[in-house]
């Protein structure tokens, strides 16, 4: 729509003033929520959900319900959680998220079916033959997607398959099955739920670079072969100390031209601690830059933050001396980043 194509020009003129002058738009009414601001934009606003926090923290639970219209399981749909023993599935935690989403008018993104991390030890430590691994992968994908058929609208089918230089990542699947496992995974997922939208997903692929070039070539090749790839996911794990890619919209637009959806799937913007006002403003710019590119693109359909509060963020546990990566503080107070998202959506409508 015209408003989406013109949003960058509008935001460039108005966002800084709007964010700095506006009072925090906390969830005091429906109109003050991120999901209300996103309504009519064509882009869903989502968050990854920590299921322990959802069960135990009432304030966290209320904000997930109020602020977002899409949810992603942070961990409970990954292989080690879903199938901890071969052929024995633990559906309950993921089912609780699906039920929560249904009760709150939200959709669910499925994350993730095939990945080199967070796999169960029975899979990675046993001496399976290639034929056995192919059958295991097929059974896992089809069983999981079939279980959530009609309940998950997007799946990250194949996650992080390229290195930053554009070469295929060395994984148990590539070593034993060859690169054809990628196409097979999409075919099996599509057979299990023909209506779900199926995504490639990775980090450091937001702008035009060797990794996103590799994804572009792969997507073009496999779609020409009839493989049901429907979307390209850009995680968006950024850091203010590194700056932000300047070619995000160019990247998203070329996937638009291939006829696939795009989504920002795991956005957070970390910083070297301690926090200060300059870093927070840079963080707000980073969050907004990705959202602007999504709003500009004809087929960008969702924008998901990888956790919305610093209280439960994964970042400090992985990046020594870094943190404060989400749009809300540990005390659930909105930061400039949250206001940047809110006003970017409002200005784009």
Image (spheres, rainbow, N blue to C red):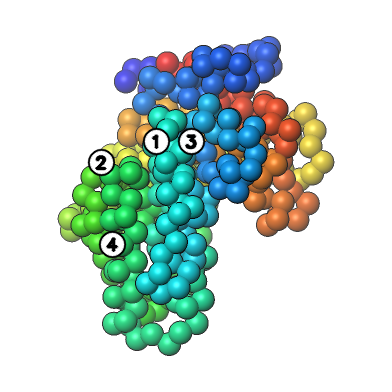
Q: Quadrant of the C terminus?
A: top left
Q: Count residues near mark 2 (Cα–Cα under 10 Å), then give few for <14, some for 14-19, many for 20+.
A: some
Viewer-closest of 238 and 243 = 238
Left/right placement of residue 128 relative to residue 288 reads: left
For disc 1, the marked residue is 102
SS for callout 3: strand
Q: Which residue is more in the foreground, 279 or 44?
A: 44
Report, in whole angstroms, how far the alpha carbon at label 4 lies from the one at label 1. Answer: 23 Å
Which label is found at residue 142?
A: 4
Quote the CA–CA distance across marks 4 and 3: 25 Å
Q: Position of residue 32 (x, y in %)?
A: 56, 16
Give the alpha-carbon distance from disc 2 to disc 4, as whole Å.
25 Å
Task: Judge whether 169 appears above or below 176 on screen.
Answer: above
Left or right, 10 with respect to 19, comes to: left
Residue 2 visible within the image: yes
Instruction: Please tell me whether mark 3 or mark 1 is closer to you in this view.
Output: 1
Which of the two labelled residues, at mark 2 and mark 4, occupies the earlier sequence position? Answer: 4
Q: Quick one: SS at disc 4?
A: helix
Q: Residue at x 51, y 76 (%)?
A: 121
Among the two numbered marks 4 and 1 on one chain, the one whose residue lies closer to the N terminus: 1
């Amino acid at each position: 729509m015209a408003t989406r194509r013109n949003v960058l020009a509008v935001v460039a003129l108005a966002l800084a003033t709007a964010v700095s002058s506006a009072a925090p738009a906390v969830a005091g009414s429906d109109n003050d929520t991120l999901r209300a601001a996103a309504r009519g934009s064509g882009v869903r606003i989502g968050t990854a959900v920590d299921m322990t926090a959802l069960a135990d923290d009432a304030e966290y639970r209320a904000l997930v319900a109020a602020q977002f219209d899409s949810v992603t399981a942070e961990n409970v749909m990954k292989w080690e959680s879903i199938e901890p023993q071969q052929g024995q599935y633990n559906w309950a935690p993921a089912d609780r998220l699906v039920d929560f989403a249904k009760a709150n008018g939200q959709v669910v993104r499925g994350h993730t079916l095939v990945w080199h991390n967070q796999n169960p030890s029975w899979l990675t430590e046993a001496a399976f033959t290639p034929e056995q691994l192919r059958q295991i992968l097929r059974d896992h994908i089809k069983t999981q997607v079939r279980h959530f058929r009609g309940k998950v609208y997007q799946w990250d089918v194949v996650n992080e398959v390229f290195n930053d230089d554009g070469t295929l990542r060395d994984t148990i699947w590539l070593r034993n099955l060859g690169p054809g496992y990628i196409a097979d995974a999409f075919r099996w997922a599509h057979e299990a739920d023909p209506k779900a939208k199926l995504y490639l997903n990775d980090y450091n692929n937001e702008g035009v670079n060797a990794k996103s070039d590799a994804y572009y070539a792969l997507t073009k090749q496999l779609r020409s072969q009839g493989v049901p790839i429907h979307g390209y996911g850009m995680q968006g794990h950024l850091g203010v100390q590194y700056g932000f890619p300047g070619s995000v919209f160019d990247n998203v637009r070329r996937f638009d031209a291939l006829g696939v959806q795009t989504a920002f799937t795991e956005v957070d913007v970390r910083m070297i601690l301690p926090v200060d006002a300059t870093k927070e403003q840079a963080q707000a710019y980073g969050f907004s830059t990705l959202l602007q590119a999504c709003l500009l693109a004809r087929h960008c359909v969702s924008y998901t933050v990888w956790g919305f509060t610093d209280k439960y963020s994964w970042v400090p546990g992985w990046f020594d001396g870094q943190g404060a990566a989400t749009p809300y503080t540990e005390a659930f107070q909105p930061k400039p980043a949250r206001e940047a998202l809110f006003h970017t959506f409002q200005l784009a409508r």
